[in-house]
Each structure stands twice: as structure tokens, then as C-alpha cells.
Amino acid sequence: MIGTVTICGVGLIGGSYALALRKAGFAGRILGVSSARTLEAARQGGVIDEGVTLEEGIPRADLIYLAQPISRILQLLPAVAALRAPHALVTDAGSTKSVIMRRALELIPGDYVLGGHPMAGKETRGVEAASADLFQGRTYVLTPGSAQTMESPIAREFAGLLEKIGCGVILLDADTHDRAVAFTSHLAQLASTSLATTVANALGKPELVQTAGPALREMTRVAMSSYDLWRDILATNQAEVLHALDQYIATLQNIRGAVSQGEAESYFAKGEFLARRLRGDLPNSSK
């Protein structure tokens, strides 16, 4: 039974998870481990019940939720492993899974490790941006540490809480997750960043940006994301990201050739199909 949750990293994701738990009716205690400024803001905003140190919060937890940047999660795992109660489930919200899962499984029995990645976020960061509805309608990937992880009552309870806060839960192994998100998330970020960079370099005069319509605004929205967040993601999934970029560059070259020949219609059709599927306009089947 999950009675106490300790969230390490009470920022956008950790804070939103806490708020979502409360909204879903969770009656247990929520502890936060973060900077003094963040903990004060989280207490004032009703995000957590109590701010604690790592040494205070980990032993008290039934569920340990690691919501820091990937490099920080990796740094904290040895201490988390040493301090956790034997029954406590350790999960994380890192955007890549293979590196985190390998390190966690070196330190913690696999039955008590359940990697996670909520496919949700904003361009803004910090507990002030946290929202109880951030996870609503979003996919939440879980990467179990062993074949038995999801058979334990605490893991099933955690997955049930995710469904209560509005997530669609799917199970993947860590490597499959990282291959998939290299295309669905990491490539999308780099495409937006590269588009914004290309336009900025090409236009030269700032006033020419006024010619931009809604399409450019929509396509460059995630270009506002901080590199501080993405540094760890790109470093820990580099091979898969480079593969995705190679595929994207090859497609751009093919489209360039098609445009020069006046034959780009098939690319528009395939692009429209995926865009409509993402928006729920088409059944989830391959064309």
C-alpha cells in the first residue's frame, strides 16, 4: 500500500505528479526533496505536504519518484538504493530509459525498479509551472526492472494511480523505448530547433519575422525548450538520436528532389496521414 510518496525533484514533472495525485484522491503523504527555494514554493502552493532532505525522505517512502534531470538521477541512485526501505518501489520520470535502468538494476532488486517516462511537458520549467492536468490524456511508458515487477501489489497500485490521473499506460523494455522516442520526441525537438535556426539565419532582418504565419509559430514552439534539459537526453540516447537524424536528413533530401521535379504529393499524403493519426482523426493502423 502506497501511504507515503517521496518526490525527488519537485519541478514541472514532479510537482505536476504530486498535484495530479491529490486531484485523483490520493490521501497519503507527499514529501519533496529539492532546493530550499523550490520546496518553499511547493509548500506554499500546496504541491507537497513536507520538504525533506534525501536522507529524511527516502527511508520514509513507499514510492520513490525521481523527477530530476537524467544526470542527477544517475548521481542519486546509489544513495536512494542505500536508504530505501526494502519494500519501496523506485520509479523515475527520465526521458531516456536504458542508461537509468542499467544503473538502477546494478543497485536495486529488479522487482522494485519500475522505470517511467510521462509523455508530457511544457517549454516552461519549475514548480510554478506544475499542473494537476499535465498528464491528462498522455501516454505514460513504464519499463519494468524484471519480469515479476508488475506482479507486485505496489507496482500495480502505482500503475493504477497513473490511470487515475488520466494516463494511458504502456509497457516497453528500455531499449525499445529509447529507439521509439528518438523519433517521436527527440527528433521533433531537433527538427523544431533546426527550423527556427534556419529561419533566423536566412531572414537576417528582424522585421522580416513579421511575415511569419501560424505554421511557423506552431512548428517552432518546442524550440523554446532549454538546452539544460536536453543536454542529458541527447547524451544518453546519442546513437538512436543520430540514427533518427540520418533518417530525417535522407527524407529531406528526397523531398528536395521531389520538389525540384514537381512530385512532392506522396510526401504530403504520408505526412497528412501521420498528423491526422496523432490527432485521433484516423484509426491506429498502418496505411
Image: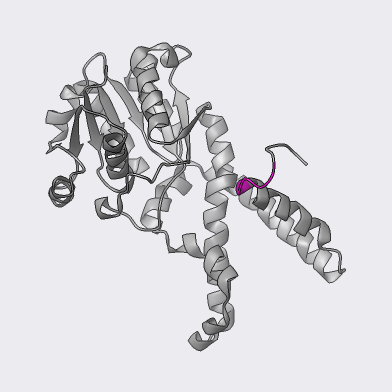
**What residue sits 65% from the left and 52% below the top?**
275
Choose between 284 and 11: the one closer to the eye.
284
Choose between 117 and 110: the one closer to the eye.
117
User: In which quarter of the view is residue 97 placed?
Assistant: top left
Is residue 223 rendered to the left or right of residue 62?
Answer: right
Residue 25: x and y in percent read 28, 31
User: In which quarter of the view is residue 21 placed?
Assistant: top left
**What residue sits 50% from the left and 42% below the top?**
237
Image position of 150 with respect to 263: above or below: above
Q: Quadrant of the C terminus?
A: top right
Residue 117: x and y in percent read 43, 36
Q: Is the magenta region chiefly helix, strand or loop?
A: loop
Residue 230 in view of the camera: yes
Q: Which residues are magenta?
A: 278-282
Image position of 83 with respect to 274: above or below: above
**What residue sits 19% from the left and 38% below the top?**
32
